């Protein structure tokens, strides 16, 4: 397969990564030699009006011709695309790739002049912890379980569905996390993300009963200080989780509003008329009455939540806690209710407050579906990219319909495999679950969502193979070999890798609640040590390879069972091969210069164990056909 004209938002193509409004910046397009391109124009739409500027040849580099044009950052988000003219007419090159038909502007490349996300976020390797299930300190044994809880031993099976699910209480706490940071260090992560830590009436704590203290069941405020100090001592970052869409019905704001129609807290929620029996009705998350929805039309809510000097958003970012930012729960619904459309206002407000409180604070949004309309608006720095990464990777690598336990001897535990041969559910439970798809469809899905946001938002979004809200990757793919391919994509594609605690040990879980599995610290014989070694090696590769953290993304081959791409930066290029099954070897032409035929190793293998790449006499390169496999070469 030969390469096509290419541009993305990485530094190779856009040297100015933090453009200012009104600045003129150069942009480059790379055209493989021999491609039918005689002339290049860049098309912009400043102030809504299309304009064309002719590009010039900047340089020739091996088999590529680099064209340059200048683009004015006329608007806070400035669109541009390339017009490639050849002997047979013109094609467009936009963020989805070359197309031979006219396309709307929303798929154009984007220059964003809003303040950039914190610099540390591009190098983050995140580990997600669900506190109740991670680790117990000795102090946890002395705490009395609350009245809502069903106390569980650490080996009690997790109930994935049913009324007991949110009430199972295992007693993990923050000091338990502090005591286990060496495990994270061995794995190679550098950022810890905690799901909610505030008092609540569930084990997940997304039904906050208050925002002013850390749940005493987790050790209270002092335990958070100890954990934050221990994380900072290692040079790492610590992120919290905040619910901006709702509180719990035990929250003091809501109980006051419920008790008194004249209470100032009444305006913080959506109350409607009373029912015939006198019961008040109110808006809640997906109709769950224990999660009353916040009304962001309220100035008082904005003050209490964000702008006041002692607001909850600010309090936990400051010493002695010093959280490095927030993951925002249900960001997609925040500020939306019927005719109310405050979402972008709220995102900008929260980002401004975070930046005022600590300049390097991160604000990351949860979206379970299409996030493209909510980014690049000076609000969320990025999103949890379920729809543009998680679901397509699942659909490509998901286990084929076989009896549970057939794959690598895996056996379902409670909350493990879905029933029988049932399809694996996706994040939002689309009827029929995740369909098994070939790589062409997977690539089309990824490109569809990537092309509608800026490179900045894409690279600062979280790529994840699962979370506390989804099935575990091991259950989805069925065996260690395909989990390695999934973890390889996690570690080598653009975006911020996120590992859900326990995935590195091969834990299973068939849905979000069922995947919240206690970490088996006391049963090391149950760990999949091979999978742990895989994650450790892949995270080290990303950490030690600048092109994997900051480089561009150029797809060079896809067939049903194979994906091949380049990550390219000024200081190096890597070639990545991902296969879900064995197949014919892949022959590539037009790769970046890798040495002459017969001159010795042209591409050193740095992960996977395949032979070094050597170009043939005609310059072509052949990749091996075994599989499932994940291989990386440094060119």
Image (tube, grey):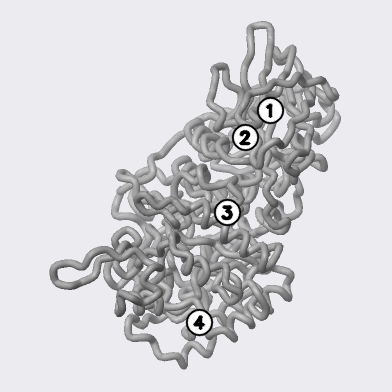
Extreme residue toward the top, this view: 87
Horizontal and vertical percent for residue 343? 48, 53
- Residue 65 placed where, x, y %? 79, 22
Left or right: 571, with 233 as reference point: right
- In the rendered image, which quarter contains the C terminus? top right
Q: What number is the disc on residue 380?
A: 3
Give the Cα separation between the discs numbered 3 and 4. 28 Å
Note whether residue 390 is visible.
yes
**Most distant residue in the bottom direction:** 142
Q: Gap between marks 2 and 4, in whole Å?
A: 45 Å
Position of 421 relative to 441 (above/below): below
Question: Badge 4 is on which residue?
Answer: 218
* Residue drawn at the location 40% of the way across and 81% of the way down: 153
Element type where label 2 sits in the image: strand
Q: Which mark is residue 6?
A: 1
Under circle 3, the secondary element is loop
Chain-order first, disc 2 or disc 3: 3
């Amino acid at each position: 397969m030969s390469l096509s004209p290419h541009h993305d938002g990485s530094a190779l193509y856009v040297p100015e990564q933090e453009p200012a409004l009104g600045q003129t910046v150069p942009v480059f397009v790379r055209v493989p030699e021999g491609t039918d391109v005689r002339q290049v124009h860049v098309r912009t739409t400043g102030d809504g009006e299309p304009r064309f500027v002719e590009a010039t040849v900047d340089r020739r580099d091996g088999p590529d011709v680099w064209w340059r044009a200048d683009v004015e950052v006329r608007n806070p988000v400035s669109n541009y695309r390339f017009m490639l003219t050849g002997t047979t007419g013109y094609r467009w090159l936009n963020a989805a790739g070359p197309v031979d038909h006219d396309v709307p502007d929303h798929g154009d490349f984007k220059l964003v002049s809003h303040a950039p996300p914190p610099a540390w976020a591009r190098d983050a390797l995140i580990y997600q912890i669900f506190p109740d299930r991670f680790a117990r300190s000795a102090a946890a044994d002395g705490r009395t379980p609350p009245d809502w809880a069903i106390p569980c031993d650490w080996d009690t099976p997790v109930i994935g569905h049913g009324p007991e699910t949110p009430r199972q209480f295992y007693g993990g706490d923050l000091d338990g996390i502090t005591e286990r940071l060496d495990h994270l260090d061995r794995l190679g992560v550098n950022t810890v993300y905690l799901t909610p830590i505030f008092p609540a009436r569930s084990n997940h704590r997304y039904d906050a009963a208050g925002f002013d203290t850390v749940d005493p069941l987790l050790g209270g405020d002092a335990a958070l200080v100890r954990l934050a100090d221990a994380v900072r001592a290692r040079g790492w970052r610590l992120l919290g989780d905040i619910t901006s869409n709702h509180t719990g019905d035990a929250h003091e704001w809501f109980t006051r509003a419920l008790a008194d129609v004249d209470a100032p807290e009444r305006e913080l929620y959506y109350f409607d008329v009373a029912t015939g029996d006198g019961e008040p009705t109110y808006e809640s998350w997906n109709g769950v009455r224990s999660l009353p929805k916040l009304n962001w039309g309220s100035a008082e809510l904005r003050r209490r939540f964000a702008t006041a000097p002692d607001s909850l958003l600010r309090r936990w970012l400051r010493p002695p806690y010093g959280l490095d930012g927030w993951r925002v729960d249900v960001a997609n619904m925040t500020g939306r209710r019927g005719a109310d459309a405050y979402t972008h206002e709220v995102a900008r407000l929260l980002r401004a407050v975070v930046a005022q409180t600590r300049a390097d604070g991160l604000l990351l949004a949860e979206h379970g579906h299409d996030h493209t309309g909510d980014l690049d608006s000076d609000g969320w720095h990025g999103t949890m990219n379920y729809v543009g990464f998680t679901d397509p990777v699942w659909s490509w690598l998901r286990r084929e319909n076989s009896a549970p336990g057939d794959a690598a001897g895996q056996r379902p535990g409670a909350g493990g495999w879905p029933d029988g041969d049932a399809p694996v559910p996706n994040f939002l439970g689309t009827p029929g679950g995740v369909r098994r798809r070939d790589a062409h469809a997977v690539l089309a899905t990824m490109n569809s969502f990537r092309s509608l946001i800026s490179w900045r938002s894409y690279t600062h979004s979280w790529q994840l193979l699962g979370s506390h809200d989804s099935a575990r990757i091991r259950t989805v793919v069925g065996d260690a070999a395909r989990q390695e391919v999934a973890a390889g994509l996690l570690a080598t594609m653009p975006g911020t890798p996120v590992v859900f605690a326990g995935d590195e040990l091969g834990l299973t879980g068939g849905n979000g609640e069922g995947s919240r599995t206690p970490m088996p610290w006391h049963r090391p014989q149950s760990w999949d040590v091979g999978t742990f070694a895989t994650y450790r090696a892949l995270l080290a590769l990303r950490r030690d390879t600048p092109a994997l953290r900051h480089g561009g993304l150029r797809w060079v081959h896809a067939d049903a069972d194979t994906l091949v791409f380049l990550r390219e930066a000024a200081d190096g290029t890597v070639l990545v091969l991902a296969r879900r099954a064995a197949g014919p070897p892949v022959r590539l032409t037009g790769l970046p210069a890798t040495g002459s035929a017969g001159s010795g190793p042209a591409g050193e293998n740095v992960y996977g164990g395949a032979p070094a790449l050597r170009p043939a006499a005609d310059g072509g390169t052949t990749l091996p056909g075994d599989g499932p496999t994940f291989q990386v070469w440094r060119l």
